[in-house]
Amino acid sequence: MRNEYFKLKRKSIKLLKSEKMTINNRPKAFTLIEVLVGGTIMIFIIMITLTLYSRSNRIAVDQNMFAQIQQDVRSAMFLISRDIRMAGVGMPIEFAGYFIMGVDNELQGQGTSAEVRPDRIILIGNMEEPLYLKIKQYQGASVTVSLEDYSFEQWGYPDYYFEDKLILILPNPASGCRAAEFRVITHVTHSQGGKNEKINMSPGLAKGINPPQNLAGTCPSSNDYDGGLVIFCDAQEYWLDVTGNYPGLTPGKDGYIGNGEKNILYLYTYNEKEKKMMHHPIAQNVENLQFEYNGDMNGDGELDGWRPWDIKWGPNEAARIQQVRIFITGCTPRPYL
């Protein structure tokens, strides 16, 4: 009996082990409910991830556009403020009324509903390179200016450096004439030792230059220029194109971009390579440009306060301007998200 008991017990143990092995060897799988729950959770995680990525990407795009606006506005402000501070450099104080001129486009007196268009500002001066040559004799509108001896030697520029440079021929301030000539140098001549020094120019005045207060012109007497000055001159005009199709300008000509490319700030100035006035784009994403001026216009010894350029102002009022305030606003190339 005892032997049979042990045989039955061993048989039961074998059966149990066989059942366990069968259970462990069965193929594993998920139920349909488990698959649905797991899929739903995965989709939810993916949607959250994509939402976070999309939002962070929009923020990055916005920040890049914002940084670009800051750079464009900062560059425009630097260039304009620098040239305003340099206006009139190298010119006699008697010509102070011709250093600067504004163009106001606020449509004053037409109510708050009137469109505020960008202003312009026109500047002249010896802003980039110094040169002061004393005139010995000049006949006015001729092609040669005779200079005082040793004039070129005082500056040390080589002869070829003067070629194609824009110059301003100023009459003697004591003459009372306030007409100056813009010319382009073809070459200079002089004898050894600084004698017989002359500037030779192309026939005719430099075209396309619109200086402040209509300074360009020729004095009635050739004696007005004796004792005057010849200087390198920068004639500049800052203006903003808000449409990309400015009337009177041809896209692709004289530096103007056009073709709907709007909100571009241009500097209209002389280009030595092209030998003419050209529009140079210096900043984009500029939405508006405005100027205000402060000075003692009534001569009472006190500043009158900020005001836009008055079309009635002439050289006398322009000479009294002591401060210029600049307003530049930027805009993103695409809507800010």
Image (cartoon, rainbow, N blue to C red):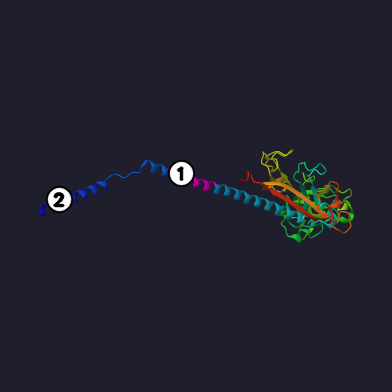
Residue under label 1: 43
Q: Is residue 56 left or right of residue 241?
A: left
Q: Is residue 151 visible?
A: yes
Residue 300 x %, y %: 89, 57
**Residue at point 58%, 49% (across, down):** 59
Looking at the image, the residue that sits furthest to the front is: 1
Position of the C terminus by quadrant? top right
Nearest the camera: 48 or 20?
20
Task: Give the overall secondary structure of the magenta segment.
Answer: helix
Check disc 2 and give the amino acid type: Leu
Check disc 1 and give the amino acid type: Ile
Quadrant of the rendered image containing residue 208: top right
Mark carried by residue 127: none
Nearest the camera: 59 or 227?
59
C-alpha distance separating marks 1 and 2: 56 Å
Query: Circle 1 sits in a helix, a strand or a loop, which is it?
Result: helix
> What range is drawn magenta here?
39-54
Does 42 appear in magenta?
yes
Q: Is residue 263 above or below residue 99?
A: above
**Residue at point 26%, 47% (across, down):** 23
Q: Earlier in the sequence, mark 1 or mark 2?
A: 2
Residue 298 x %, y %: 88, 54
Q: Callout 1: few (<14), some (14-19), or many (20+) C-alpha neighbours within 10 Å? A: few
Residue under label 2: 8
Q: Is residue 82 above or below residue 114?
A: below
Query: Circle 2 sits in a helix, a strand or a loop, which is it?
Result: helix
Nearest the camera: 230 or 99?
99
Q: Mark 1 or mark 2, which is nearer to you? A: 2
Residue 85 x %, y %: 76, 56
Residue 310 x %, y %: 83, 48
Nearest the camera: 176 or 93?
93
Disc 1 vs disc 2: Cβ atoms closer than 8 Å? Answer: no
